[in-house]
Amino acid sequence: MDIQLKRGLLDVCVLAAIKDKDSYGYKIIKDLKPYIELSESTLYTILKRLESGKMLTVRTAEHGGRLRKYYRITNEGLGRIDDFKTEWKEIISIYQFVTKEDDKDE
Amino acid sequence: MDIQLKRGLLDVCVLAAIKDKDSYGYKIIKDLKPYIELSESTLYTILKRLESGKMLTVRTAEHGGRLRKYYRITNEGLGRIDDFKTEWKEIISIYQFVTKEDDKDE
DNA sequence: GTGATATACATCGTAACACGAGGTATTCTG
DNA sequence: CAGAATACCTCGTGTTACGATGTATATCAC
């Protein structure tokens, strides 16, 4: 997928990945893989950004001798997903504009 | 609309705006306004980028005492629109992931 | 006729962002 | 024991949208 197109989707995808159940970095990447691929450097940057934007909270827990940082979505984070659903209507309208009259002579 | 979300859509919108008929900067902005807003500085940057990427060609013509630069889409530009239609399937899949089980307790 | 608005182009600096490269450390598997 | 997998992190770079700013002409209101 085009990198520019990903920019507007990644934050919301990460929020969606922790929406129903707290999760941690490595797992988020694997869970998102079927839908959108992102590198670790990208993910940790996003998690930092979402944390400072109060979209999620962090908690450190030990698991199998290793430390894991679990991320939990906040109400603001859920609101961000709702905003995306609003924006989706605009995206649909743009898609229709871009593809309109596209197959006029088929 | 979120600025990050626009990034992946603007190039394709500009191409779509000149797809059926050559157009020029000022008109492109007005034609796109109902779908997506962009400033002049943004548009001229995009036009330069699309030109150097061979997505469109430019021709200067006089109109009412003023010079206008008319932009015409190339086959590569049309291909870029087709690529977007392919990416659209991924976007739909992402949208479904983000919104899934969203209203499970309503 | 003059000031404002619309048309029409352009450049520059800035901030946001995804990513590759690189780093640290532990556990699991062959 | 070696290498892969797990799990975290930082830094530098290139791309990009945008506001600010500049130039110039045409049109419209008063």
Image (tube, coloured by chain):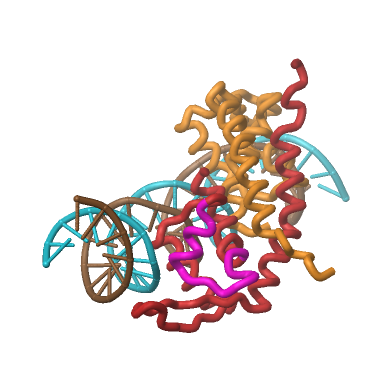
Chain colours: A orange, B red, C cyan, D brown
Is residue B93 found left or right of C26 in the rendered image? right
| Residue depicted at x 56% and y 23% | A74
Relative image position of residue A97 (x, y in whole percent): 65, 56
* Majority secondary structure of magenta residues: helix
- Residue B49 appears at what percent x and percent y? 50, 71
Foreground residue, B65 or A47? Answer: B65
The answer to whether A6 is drawn above or below residue B72 in the figure is above
Task: Determine the residue positioned at 74% across, 64% down.
Answer: A102
Looking at the image, residue B37 sits to the left or right of residue B97; the answer is left
Q: Is residue A30 covered in magenta?
A: no
- From what the image shows, is residue C27 above or below residue B30? above
**Measured along the vertical axis of the image, is residue B91 above or below residue C27?**
below
Q: Residue at x 57, y 77 (%)?
A: B72
Q: Position of residue B8 (x, y in %)?
A: 58, 56
Which residues are the magenta region? B16-33
Answer with the quarter of the image where residue A19 lies. top right
**How many marks on residues?**
0
Quadrant position of the C terminus of chain B in the picture: top right
Of B90 and B27, nearer the camera is: B27
Q: As rendered, which of C7 and D23 lies closer to the eye?
A: C7
Q: Residue at x 76, y 45 (%)?
A: B93
